[in-house]
Image (cartoon, rainbow, N blue to C red):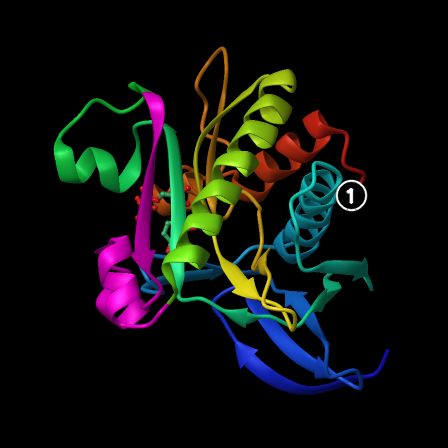
Amino acid sequence: MEKRTELYRGKAKTVFTTDDPERLILQFRNDTSAFDGEKVEQLDRKGMVNNKFNNFIMAKLEAAGIPTQLDRVLSDTETLVKRLDMIPVECVIRNFAAGSLVRRLGVTEGQALNPPTFEQFLKNDALHDPMINESIAISFGWATAEQLARMKQLTYQVNDVLSALFDEAGMMLVDFKLEFGVDGDGNIVLGDEFSPDGCRLWDKETRKKLDKDRFRQGLGGVVEAYEEVAARLGIAL
Ligand code: UDP
């Protein structure tokens, strides 16, 4: 597999083309950002930890029948993935109240949400990822009703698989964000990444935060927390 040109540089990952038009390389960097890129720092080992974390989770999801873009790991920080046309709609499920939900509704952090909530946001940093809904996404042509229904179904499936996985390892999956794309055959496939950068994980007993809120809130020990989560899941780093 030959790495060719840089296609896109995101806040934490760079995407490269390859000699295969159907494959891309995701390179996980140490850059850590919050507040739509306003706060950025380099955190040692984070690219490697998130690459290995993401590969472990994506393989678990594939095994549970959820289509993902994962092909194979190339190095500590690089993974080969299927090329997708990404849909600019972020799907968020919450099992417990935190983050923007608490700010928006003034509810108590940690309140259990039964059933879990499902929200959609437009992927657009300049606009601070505004909340949207299905009707808006369809009218603007960002996705069809069928694609949105499939994305919602898959996000709930991911929640079932990963809530159980983290629960067994002594953690609460508070909330998470997923991004999907369309493959060459028109199938909706899970893209982007699943790592502590894009979800909230709390220790079940102490409710210690083990995710990017440590960075957002300046709590320190960010990568150490990610490594602790990885160790609890049995991921070799
Ligand atoms: N999230 C994300 N990228 C974003 C916005 C949110 O990965 O651009 C994740 C975030 O880490 C959390 C979940 O989506 O796990 C819900 O985030 P929330 O709406 O509470 O926003 P935040 O408080 O993180 O701004």
- Mark 1, residues whose alpha carbon is within 10 Å: few (<14), some, or many (≥20)? some
Seen from the viewer's position, the closer of residues 40 and 77 is 77
Q: Name the residue that disc number 1 marks.
A: 237
Q: Relative to 228, does residue 70 appear above or below in the rendering?
A: below
In this image, 138 relative to 159: left or right?
Answer: left
What percent of the width, then of the height, locates residue 17?
69, 83
Q: Which residue is drawn at 49% across and 10% down?
A: 205
Q: Give the range drawn in magenta.
A: 114-142
Seen from the viewer's position, the closer of residues 214 and 114 is 114
Seen from the viewer's position, the closer of residues 97 and 181 is 181
Q: Relative to 72, does residue 110 appear above or below in the rendering?
A: above
Q: Quadrant of the N terminus?
A: bottom right
Q: Which residue is drawn at 24% across and 68% down?
A: 139
Residue 78 belongs to the span the image colors magenta: no
Q: Which secondary structure, mark 1?
A: loop
Residue 122 belongs to the span the image colors magenta: yes
What percent of the width, then of the height, locates residue 124?
32, 68
Q: Which residue is drawn at 53% across and 43% down?
A: 154
What percent of the width, then of the height, locates residue 5?
67, 89
Instruction: Tell me the amino acid under the disc marked 1.
Output: Leu
Q: Quadrant of residue 6?
A: bottom right
Q: Relative to 101, does residue 24 appear above or below in the rendering?
A: below
Q: In which quarter of the image is the C terminus?
A: top right
Q: In which quarter of the image is residue 187?
A: bottom right
Residue 76 visible in the picture:
no
Residue located farthest toward the front when viewing the structure as drawn? 146
Residue located farthest toward the right when viewing the structure as drawn? 1
In this image, 210 relative to 213: left or right?
Answer: right
Residue 215 visible in the picture:
yes
